[in-house]
Image (cartoon, rainbow, N blue to C red):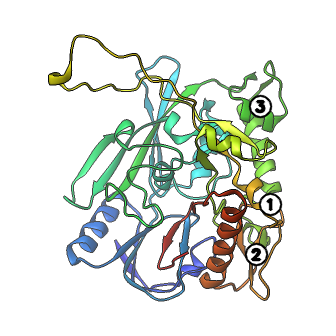
Amino acid sequence: MVDVTPRPLAELTTLRTGGTPERMVDARTQDELVDALRFAWATGDDWLVLGGGSNLFVGDDPLEGTVIRVLTRGIERLPSPHEGRARLRVQAGHDWDDLVAHAVAEGLAGLEAMSGIPGTVGAAPVQNIGAYGQEVVRTLVEVDLIDEATGEVSTVPADELGLGFRTSVLKAHYGSVPDRSAVILSATFDLAQVGAQPRPVAGSQLRTALGLTEEGTATLSEIRRRILEIRAGKGMVLDTEDPDTWSAGSFFQNAVVSASFARSLPPECPRWPVEPDLDPVLVIPLAAFDGTVPAPETREPDVKVSAAWLIEQAGIRRGFRLAPSRAGLSTKHALALTNRGGASAAELAQLARFIRARVHAEFGLMLQPEPVLVNIEL
């Protein structure tokens, strides 16, 4: 690990906010990252791991403690125990979109719809990132991580990470702490070997985005190219010349609500069913077991609804600002809160609070922020 002169996090986060930490460390190898974390934990000081800075909203006051920049890189191809598949083990600091580009070039399917998502590989499982029907949970096999409680490095199967809709046991949700305080060192993905030929495209969300029928086909490179075009059109591909991309991506999560609540929303509100648990675990205390197993409960699956639609229907249009604030919605996408140039974290927080209040007043639903908030409150 290498101590470096601390820089304002406004220079290292895509929202361009954040004060200067007391100490900053660059970790370029896994051993350096482990050493830096163990040292920070031993001191008992505050600490923050920084990857691409694309999922952080940081306050402008100076930060106490240490910021550890994860700069590890590398992709290792491994055999898969499943026929027709291959595995990629990737260092935590590796750029996510670079991984997707590598997988597509190698003819490996499972990540292509997540092209253009900013950030690092180590952050992807924490957030269980996803787009157009693909999610990390569908291909992640395991992660190597280090636990704060013990300082030990271990390999953890994906099914022990509590991966759900934009969440995991490692994520610090707004107003809470993570269930497991640990840092990912590397992640391993199991991908289908499909080559460069056109093939059927699974998933209605992805087919709709690509303009394909159920019988339509596309190559991995065609899917990647089209997704990058779509994301760029929404200001969701980082561009130093475009203020619409000076954001943390989608600032608010698409809300997952009960089917009954979804019916209370206008029918025009875009919605998608959330896949139900097809194999729920039923636990019957031995003392209460009478030899019969009750029929499984049936209920309607939850529904994911469009936060962008709710925001716009609450009267907040793309490009909206609270004058004279330098924070505003993207002119291309209602979910992206953007720094139009020199905006403070306080200005962005004011805009976020205004949007939440308007949507709640109009639809009775409180939108939840997607980025991790550091040194700032909504």
Q: Residue 328 carries which label?
A: 2
| Residue lying furthest left | 287
Instruction: Please report the residue visible at 69 percent of the width from the left and 29 percent of the height from the top.
Output: 203
> In the figure, is residue 288 to the left or right of 363?
left
Q: Which mark is residue 207?
A: 3
Verify CB contact (< 8 Å) between mark 2 and mark 1.
no
Q: Disc 3 residue type?
A: Arg
Q: In which quarter of the image is the N terminus?
A: bottom left
What quarter of the picture does the C terminus occupy?
Answer: bottom right
Q: Which numbered disc flags the more N-terminal residue, 2 or 1?
A: 1
Closer to viewer: mark 3 or mark 2: 2
Q: Residue at x 62, y 37 (%)?
A: 259
Label 2 secondary element: strand
* Circle 1 residue: 312
Q: Earlier in the sequence, mark 1 or mark 3?
A: 3
The amino acid type of the residue labelled 2 equals Gly
